[in-house]
Amino acid sequence: MKTMKTMKTMKTMKTIKLLAYIFIGGLFAACSSESGDDIPTPVIPTTYSGDITEDVTWTSDNIYTLDGRVMVVDGVTLTIEAGTVIKGAPGTGADASALIIARGGKIMANGTAANPIVFTSSADNSTSGTSGFGSGLSSSDQGLWGGVLILGNADISADANPLQIEGIPVEETNGLYGGGSSSNNSDNSGVFRYVQIRHGGAEIGEGNEINGLTLGGVGSGTQISHVEIIANLDDGLECFGGSVDCDNILVWGAGDDSFDVDQSYSGTINNFLGILISGDQALEIDGWEGAMQADFSLTNGTIIGAPGDKNNCGKFKSNASGSVSNMLYTNMKNGATLTVDASATGITFSNISFEAGYTQTLVDDLGSTVWNDNNNGTGGATLSNFDGWSCASYMNAY
């Protein structure tokens, strides 16, 4: 007959053996023996906060969470697979969630028309970019998280260079943009293609929100193409200096400006669509602030006004310089305004059209006619370029 002490000893030995088997089995599962080396399988987290300090790939079989500011630092590359969904946790001020690519860092977000990459709020239950809004959300749900900021070393026109980017607290040392005395207009911050950014614009202070996509001193080696910004509390796209070209950009439901350029942005925004709600300006163009002066180009754009709302066609502010061509305005209420500052003498307009029946003639601050309505409703963006991959196309917003 086994004594109680013997039974306890046997039970303990069985437990030790079981744990040993589990441990050994775990080692075999985590190792590769093909080459004879035991290599642990890395565990990739799905929730991120703070600095990313080594190269990492976010894969489409996971949903990733930004819990506060996430910074891709100098020398590090973040790769995001096509079809990946990234969600920003709620928060304002210093707790606002945002993805920031610092100077010298790189993002390789190469989505496809069939599988766009999605940045959205954690309140959005979407699991892909091909299903429209998540349940209960719409184009008016703004400011639920921050946004995406890409910072580079290209030229900016500012009194200080480099400069702290708008929307990021000054204590964040990786928030600088512009190359200063080492500016490089060919700077390469990576690829950002076939990407949706939804429901951003969290406040970091009173009257200070994060743009949907902020480009600060981004160089021409960077590729920005087929990007949609929806329901952002502040601007949709804002370019602070830099020389990067952007094409096929859609902004729907911005709380402030749809498209904003500052500090002698010298690139081209080509084939763009703005779908207005009750925001401020369709276009806001600011001029140079420092010694460096350069011209922007906006070409092949369509602006769709909000029903019954007296939308503003654009504001061209002090020292603005560049060209606007092949623009079409539709669904604009009579009385829509255009403001061109008297010092914005470098602005040129060509082939500006309004839908048939619009009767407003737009004049600048000096009373000179700027755009005459030709009532032919032609020109503008190639809207089919947004079909099949943008949330706006799924929701029949244009």
Image: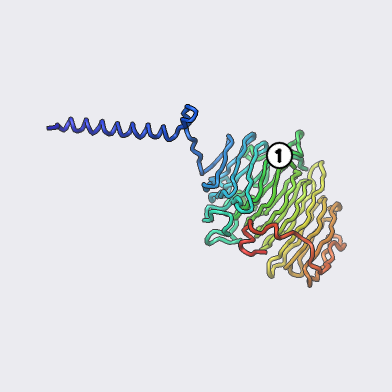
- Please state the horizontal and vertical placement of residue 185, each as a whole percent of the image: 76, 39
Judged from this view, the residue extending furthest toward the right is: 368
Q: Is residue 124 left or right of residue 10?
A: right
Q: Which quarter of the rendering shows the C terminus?
A: bottom right
- Residue 108 shows in the view: yes
Question: Based on the displayed image, in which of its 4 quarters is residue 72 positioned?
Answer: top right
- Please state the horizontal and vertical placement of residue 222, each as a whole percent of the image: 71, 42
- Please state the horizontal and vertical placement of residue 262, each as a whole percent of the image: 75, 48
Residue located 73% across and 41% down the image: 221
123 in relation to 369, above or below: above
Q: Is residue 340 left or right of residue 10?
A: right
Question: Based on the displayed image, in which of its 4 quarters is residue 327 positioned?
Answer: bottom right
- Residue 160 shows in the view: no
Q: What count of labels does the image hold? A: 1
Mark 1 lies on residue: 188
Residue located 73% across and 49% down the image: 246
Give the secondary structure at mark 1: loop
